[in-house]
Image (cartoon, rainbow, N blue to C red):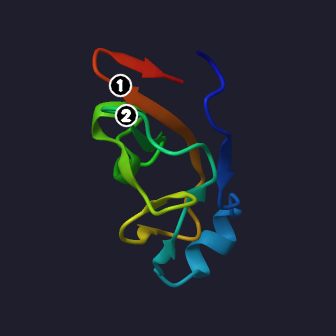
Amino acid sequence: MHGVGPCGVLGAPMSPVESAKAPAKIVKVKLHIKLQGPGPAERFVVTGSHEALGSWNPGSGLPLEWQGSAWVNKSPLPISPSDRVEFKFVRLRPGQVDW
């Protein structure tokens, strides 16, 4: 099944001058997605271009937890505001990855 969840981009690229002037900051991002409740042995992760998202490896992606009406990440995702981060919500089932 393709198109399990939305994908997106966080952050905006900065010009080299802005980047040189910008102090190092970390932004904590909280993600959630509203989908149906979990099926047997089913879980969701967020994977993407940032190492905290597994560098496009779903097995190393940011795990999401079912909280009654939405899938959410347990702890905020620390990223720099100058980082451009592409991401995708992915469903993992035994022996199967649904992008």
Report the residue at 37% width, 34% height from top. 42
Residue 2 lies left or right of residue 67; in this view the side is: right
Question: Is the residue 64 above or below the residue 16 in the image?
Answer: above
- Residue 48 image position (x, y, % from top left): 48, 41
Report the residue at 55% width, 62% height from top. 31
In this orientation, which residue lies closer to the viewer: 6 or 27? 6
Q: Secondary structure at mark 1?
A: strand
Report the residue at 48% width, 61% height from top. 72
- Residue 33 image position (x, y, % from top left): 61, 53
Q: Residues within 10 Å of mark 1 (few under 14, many from 20)?
A: some
- Residue 87 image position (x, y, % from top left): 56, 43
Q: Amino acid at mark 1?
A: Arg
- Residue 79 image position (x, y, % from top left): 46, 66
In this orientation, which residue lies closer to the viewer: 57 or 38? 38
Looking at this view, name the residue that lies furthest to the bottom: 23
Q: Which mark is residue 31?
A: none
Q: Which mark is residue 42?
A: 2
